Amino acid sequence: MSKDYAVIGKNVPKIDGREKATGAAKYAGDLKFPNMLFGKILTSPHAHAKILSIDTSEAEKLPGVKAVITHKDVPALKYGISPARWDENIFCIDKVRFVGDKVAAVACIDEETCYKALKLIKVEYEVLPAVLDALHAMDEGAPQVHDEYPRNINTEIHQNFGDLDKAMAEAHYIRKDYFVGQRTYQSPIEPHSAVSIWKDNKLTIYSSTQSPHYFQYYIAREFGLKMGDVRIIKPFVGGGFGGKLEPTGLEFAGSVLSKLTGRPVRTFYDRHEMFAHNRGRHKVYMELTTGVDKEGKILGVHANFVSDGGAYTSLGVATSYYAGGLLTLTYEFENYKFDMIRVYTNLPACGAQRGHGAPQPKYAFESHLDNIAKDLGIDPLEIRLRNARQPNTVTINDFGINSCELTACLEKAADISGWREKKGNLPKGRGIGIATGSFVSGAGYPIYRNDLPQSAAMIKVHEDGTAATLYTGAVDIGQGSDTALCQMAAEAMGYRYENMKIIAADTETTPHDFGAYSSRQTLMSGSACKQAGEEIKKQILDIASTIMSLPPDDLDCRLGIIFSKSRPTAKTITFEEAARRFFVLRGPLLGRGVYHVPRLGGTFKGAAVATSPAYSFCAQISEVQIDEETGEVDVCEVWDVHDCGQVINPMQLHGQVHGALYMGVGEAIWEEVLFDDQGKILNPNLGGYMLPTALDMPIVHSELVESYEPAGPWGVKEVGEGATNPTMGCFNNAIYDAMGVRIDSLPLTYEKVWRAMKEKREGKKEV
Amino acid sequence: MSKDYAVIGKNVPKIDGREKATGAAKYAGDLKFPNMLFGKILTSPHAHAKILSIDTSEAEKLPGVKAVITHKDVPALKYGISPARWDENIFCIDKVRFVGDKVAAVACIDEETCYKALKLIKVEYEVLPAVLDALHAMDEGAPQVHDEYPRNINTEIHQNFGDLDKAMAEAHYIRKDYFVGQRTYQSPIEPHSAVSIWKDNKLTIYSSTQSPHYFQYYIAREFGLKMGDVRIIKPFVGGGFGGKLEPTGLEFAGSVLSKLTGRPVRTFYDRHEMFAHNRGRHKVYMELTTGVDKEGKILGVHANFVSDGGAYTSLGVATSYYAGGLLTLTYEFENYKFDMIRVYTNLPACGAQRGHGAPQPKYAFESHLDNIAKDLGIDPLEIRLRNARQPNTVTINDFGINSCELTACLEKAADISGWREKKGNLPKGRGIGIATGSFVSGAGYPIYRNDLPQSAAMIKVHEDGTAATLYTGAVDIGQGSDTALCQMAAEAMGYRYENMKIIAADTETTPHDFGAYSSRQTLMSGSACKQAGEEIKKQILDIASTIMSLPPDDLDCRLGIIFSKSRPTAKTITFEEAARRFFVLRGPLLGRGVYHVPRLGGTFKGAAVATSPAYSFCAQISEVQIDEETGEVDVCEVWDVHDCGQVINPMQLHGQVHGALYMGVGEAIWEEVLFDDQGKILNPNLGGYMLPTALDMPIVHSELVESYEPAGPWGVKEVGEGATNPTMGCFNNAIYDAMGVRIDSLPLTYEKVWRAMKEKREGKKEV
């Protein structure tokens, strides 16, 4: 547990920073290949309709059109990222299920011809009644989105831990609240794009993906190819946030178009199409009932949720489990009931988005807990301290917690924000709120192939020792994993970061890794990189011992200098010298590492869902100013205190906190995907979908507490998603503190605040 | 020595065939980078001149010019590919030494601006007397090309093996002949091109190179960079033939231009500039004196050569040693004197070209031996059989020969060509000639860093076993090494060629390998690939033994099927299954291999020169038709019989023989770089420099003899260069057989044949 690290814990520059800043970095949409065609997908204009006929003959006649495909030209095998619920086809066969559902595709010599050709495809539809409201999707007689799923129930979870009835019977106080979380969209700066090249029965796809190895598996499965004949390469990726984890129509259609034409095909979504594809955060209806004792100690919780999954499963099974499962992390209680139904509707499918399932329930629970605190006259900080999760505990739903400094996070956040001075003493219109968060450091069970290790890594040292290349399947989508993993490899090798190179996220050249999701890479990929680095160091010290005539056990290597541990002032040799000798005598100097998840406490009775080897914790406090005339919410300042174990790169870590908070700020106040009564998105662009700008961001204080996670390499754990979780609840609590109004649905728009204040003034509403 | 191979010895398709045939393959000149500039080099118009001043101010003012550099902007450190004789500067400092010497360079926004800018650079010269004739370069008072090399002597070799004086005294017959070999140029279809990207003290160069690892070493040395900070990547390369082995002004100037401008810079030679850069075959003046006994058995040889090296050393030291050293290979004799002087002249530098040093001496010696045979009344085939090298012998200059089927080659060539029926029985004007050849299978001593292994390799098996990637520094420049090495790796692994992928010739991602020269890769890189493959197989069989409950020693793997050797009909499992199990239990499945040259017999007294672990042998017979009116030489048919050990890919092998023969045909009859009296090339283009076309090619019969080379993996040895060696002598002997005239200088042009016939008719010349 020595903190005397040479490479990790330092602010090294991002390994790809210069390329990105200078515009040299190539994204999937920048790639050009000789003879490359452009591919576009024709989508449904109806939320729900039978396909009566498709006539592609006019489109085929248009000069410049090289291929037109429909469901007849592609495998009928259903796919999806959730194995138990494969419910998507490459193209719709019998009917379309949302405005944007995939019907056909064209490959043309240029983009303009694509759009012309799409207009020439004649599809005859019989419009069906659509179900657009999740709460009525289960009604008797409601339109059925998939015949195989009666009453439109896609996922249904009913879990009961402890004895909730007994807990409620013994409770001093019970409160029930209702909240609604809105549908949002990830808004990565780079829309999804892919280039597919199918030749000689081998398929290569350059894709804007969070997981080349998942893509490889699903694409090989769909087309009946061997995995070794499918190569997925991730170029630079401009953000994913969960939306680029599953293969899309772009890859499937592009592959078939390439196979038919014998030419590379670039398929791409424009921003509008990205919104239609969606896979963003579910709209979720949440009822929470909590019983507490006199001191506000939580005795039992009942979470009863319904979520709107849209037309397909996407990652919604995992989202559903996360929604309730992760609610047990931050506060300790022994009785818990979780009921969840995810329904199909005729809207775009929802999936994973930063914090995956957790942020909206957290918004609800933190608001709910503040209500209880208010009812009991307990300070919101105090009620959280009384219930806060402690280290080395197990949640009622069987998640094993090792490190947990949530109490320290709360105390530090209170200190640096001046909570105790401010709370109750701010002028009207100004308020302070608090909330907590927690998140997994990787999902213990991958989406498929449970038997595989989570991550593997290789390191090759250059023959003269002046450089080393890390090969990892881990996926840098902007979060900086390439940089962090090179730091970790260099630390383990006793080498320098400046001399590291990296080859990442190419299924052909890099070892398996499940990719960038569930905040898994620093812990999981990092473990594999550490092991590979240690294997290098062992070999280096072994050869050094023959050069230095000292036992290997007495040697160590740090920043490329090999020295005697017992006589640190004695003569040293360089890593380079030892590496060169190694190559001469023994050949290429290679190290390999592999990370398996250890057997975890959690089984989440009845389903193999994701528990994690480690959990981060954080506390957030925010201060807001409300304009009483307009309801405008000005978030002035946010204090985030994180327990994320050992830090690898502080600059990147705080960048992740800022980014997660940014996402939370947007979802808290402005962002919502809106539909008209025909199921068509009203705001499918960055004009209508209100992302915050830099000027909308509050002052952010990102701080850490000392922590060491035994399950992580050097004690690391999650940071990339956790800070999104508390933000919406934190702001809602600050608004309540400022104005005494409680907003029970997201986003916490100015209008809702204004309306709530008005209703309160008029005595219409009491919270 | 079982020949029951599963993958090698088969005609698998070239791994890059489709990409090349469809035009998808990217060569260095096809690469484009954002913000890329174009760079061109200003060269000297004089063969020899002092540089009085260089004024770049006008060029710098031209819009679109981003940098102009001269010797003042680059390191003054001399470089060269021959370590003992570094004599080149990136740009000339005090004087220019040939028409085409490098003076300055520009980087501009486009090619056109480059040419304009070059014209605006004002260089004031004081023209000096030039030495353009190698035979007068050593004269007292001759102009000095380099002050450090008196009398213009660049390389001087005087070797004496055995007791030549005694041998000559005992000889039944002694003959002395004089021959001249001309200067030629390699004419790769792709002119040399490079893109240099220098940023953050790291330099990446995409170069049309035969040896990324040599380039890396020399470029790092020149710029004082660590090797790990220099990355050389070979894209597809369109031929090299020796001319792309050494780094050129393109890489050096391009690197500095990129450093100064902060932008990628593409530098390139057009065809004219390729000729001026040259580095092709030396013009060489050859005196041969041989003593034989009554039966024509060679007793002693004196080779006395002078070669025209041009203005710089290039690879000329090695060329000089090869010129005499390799003369001892094909025929056994015990007394040998070799005198060689390579002189500097004010012409472009000469270097390595297919057969490196050997073809012209071989032309001379094979002509000379035919003269002796004629003088003694011995059949040319017979004199060769009497002297032919036998296996498991050591040459007088200490080259250890293992396999050698030269006698079988001669016999087979005689059989298939009908030599014994044709010789003496062809009508006048038609003739048949014979010659032999031999070449190294790699140079035992690399050009630098003798302590390094020659080749290393890595193999990574894909996690589900359906593909494996070979990482090698070996360099495919069109000869097919990527294909052959994948075959060898698959054979060693017990795997399938179709599932192999390859990453090659990139100093950052692939292990060290010296590259494509001296016909080294099949034996040397192949050995490393074989070892890596065997390491994979060992691990696969080990894990398979746990699955199959059989001892690993009883298991073998062939084409991806693992079976019991003792019970071949028992249940088998697949490589894929074992690989997947391996990955789950033990992590990435990696193999590594390394090849060191064993201690060789040859020391070539007095100099560490290249001897080889193995030598190929071949016999060639050709039939020509001479037009008595015009002297036109029509080569009707050539029979080449090669002893190249085990064949990896017969189609590629015969392709190499055809290619080498093509080169020999051109050099024999048409090709010569010609200069005016100012040292300017008269024919620097493919109009004036007469390469044969497909229509000029004779019918070629390429055949093999059974052979196994113990030093090579599976018994392989050289094939790529050997067939060039005998061709010129073989044709000359056929011309003599046809017309009774002996042409004593290359090329054997129609004019020379016509003139010789005329002189013979007029009684002016006797051979």
Image (cartoon, coloured by chain):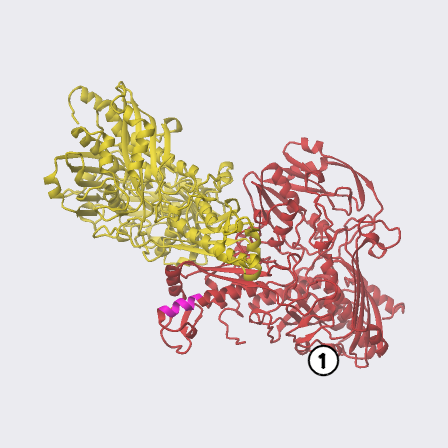
Chain colours: A yellow, B red
Give the image quarter of residue A646: top left
Give the image quarter of residue B111: top right
Q: Which residue is mark 1?
A: B420
Q: Nearer the viewer, residue B399 or A227?
A: B399
Q: Looking at the picture, which amino acid does disc 1 mark?
A: Arg
Tell me if A198 is positioned left or right of A135 in this view.
right
Q: Position of residue B488 (x, y in %)?
A: 52, 66
**Where is A548 relative to A657, above or below?**
below
Q: Is residue A499 visible?
A: yes
Report the residue that reaches farthest toward the bottom. Answer: B295
Q: Is residue B583 magenta?
A: no
Q: Nearer the viewer, residue A725 or A746?
A: A725
Q: Nearer the viewer, residue A606 or B121?
A: A606
**Where is A167 relative to A640, above or below?**
below
Q: Position of residue A16 (x, y in %)?
A: 48, 41
SS under mark 1: helix
Q: Report crowding for label 1: few under 14, some 14 to 19, many 20 or more residues within 10 A (C-alpha).
A: few
Kindly report the secondary structure that dominates the magenta region of the rendered protein. helix
Tell me if B254 is positioned left or right of B34 in this view.
right
Q: Which residues are magenta?
A: B539-546
